[in-house]
Image (cartoon, rainbow, N blue to C red):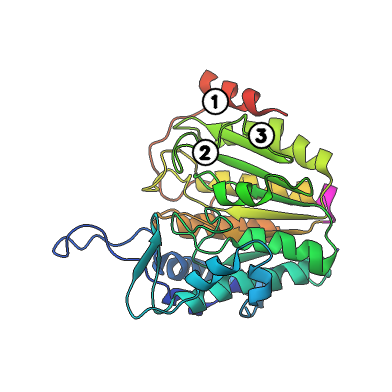
Amino acid sequence: MPNRTGLVYDERCFGHRNPPSGPPWLNVPPFERPERLAETFRALEHSGVLRKVERLAARSAPRTALELVHDASHVERVLAEPHDTVELDDEAWIGPGTRTAALYAVGGLLDAVAAVVAGELRNAFVIARPPGHHAEAARPMGFCLLNATAVAARWAQLARGARRVVILDWDVHHGNGTEAIFRDDSSVLTISLHQDRLYPYDTGDVDTPGEALINVPLPVGTGDAGYALAFERVVEPAVRSFAPDLLLIGAGQDAAASDPLGRMSVTVPGFREWTDRTVALADECCGGRVVAFLEGGYSLRHLPAANLAILEGLAGLPSSFPEDPVGCDIPRGLRDVERAAVEAAIV
């Protein structure tokens, strides 16, 4: 097994711009914005971790790959190049720089998957935007335009011989798009750990029917201990039983305690623990082949540190943050409501 961890980061992903909220005189910046990447890179640079990982150059994803999971008409709409910002669907916009950003985000993930499956890298983290896990085959929504992890899963199967793939999505919002794409496919296991009834409010129930899907809707305020229990009781047994050839992470850090779009209580050490557990699981089940793709995460306080913690975990490096650097007030320990939510999700 190679020891190197790959990193994909490309400033061409900055060009996609979502509009501000509210009236012009208020000028509320969008939640999903280029600073998510810029502030993350600043943290990676100053921490010294960039000297200990291998940078991968992203290439533009081919349309043929996108159309493995998306309708051709959907791809055409997303890759249109309007002169001004256009809302395609619920909170899903495109603009002059969207096409390039979206193609390099997905292409960067495909390049990382290719390197990991080929054994050139042990694992990788793709820090790109826009995110993708809400995008369905024919519908963009929730900041998501092209479903990168879904594209990568199917492409890995068809082009790189990975017969069985797990997509572990720990974004605070339900990964409805990924679930819809693979609902009737027993070769891709989708696991979504999310805040119950957040977004989309009508998806993500524990009893959703499907060939290979697991939803773990968690109550508001679930923190590190609750997620650790979900890993122990639900995620790890399910992945072991499925025996994948590749594990993809939908790494949305919006469960962080300071995130404006989630109401959970996760700390930076919590994200490091999830990563460590996932790396150990991949070592056990699929030769260490795991690739993470940035989904959500909108707190510029927590996101850079959480992304750094994930990259350090993938690379097996000592943690820069044994304690949470943001210092939000959070509940501690497990509650009965969290235990009940996890028990309900056990397959």
Q: Do the residues labelled 2 and 3 touch (CB within 8 Å)?
A: no
Q: Name the residue carrying label 1.
A: 338
Q: Distance between the residues labelled 2 and 1?
A: 19 Å
**Label annotation for residue 227:** none
Residue 4 seen by the camera: no
Q: Are marks 1 and 3 in contact (CB under 8 Å)?
A: no
Of residues 198 and 47, the one drawn nearer to the viewer in this rendering: 198
- Relative side of 1 to 239, left or right: right
Q: Is the C terminus in the top left, top right, bottom left or bottom right quadrant?
A: top right
N-terminal of the pair, mark 2 or mark 1, is: 2
Q: Residue at x 42, y 35 (%)?
A: 330
N-terminal of the pair, mark 1 or mark 3, is: 3
Give residue 144's position: percent from left, percent from top. Answer: 49, 59
Q: Which residue lies furthest to the left in this view?
A: 25
Q: Is residue 94 magenta?
A: no
Q: The disc labelled 2 sits on which kind of residue?
A: Thr
- The dominant secondary structure in magenta is helix
Q: Name the residue carrying label 3.
A: 209
Nearer the camera: disc 2 or disc 1: 2
Give residue 63's position: percent from left, percent from top. Answer: 63, 75
Q: The disc labelled 1 sits on which kind of residue?
A: Glu
Q: The disc labelled 3 sits on which kind of residue?
A: Pro
**Label annotation for residue 203:** 2
Of residues 288 and 159, the one drawn nearer to the viewer in this rendering: 159
Assess disc 3: are there few (<14), some (14-19) or many (≥20) residues with their C-alpha within 10 Å of its C-alpha: few
The region drawn magenta spans 283-287
Instruction: Tell how many labels.
Output: 3
Give residue 180's position: percent from left, percent from top. Answer: 61, 48
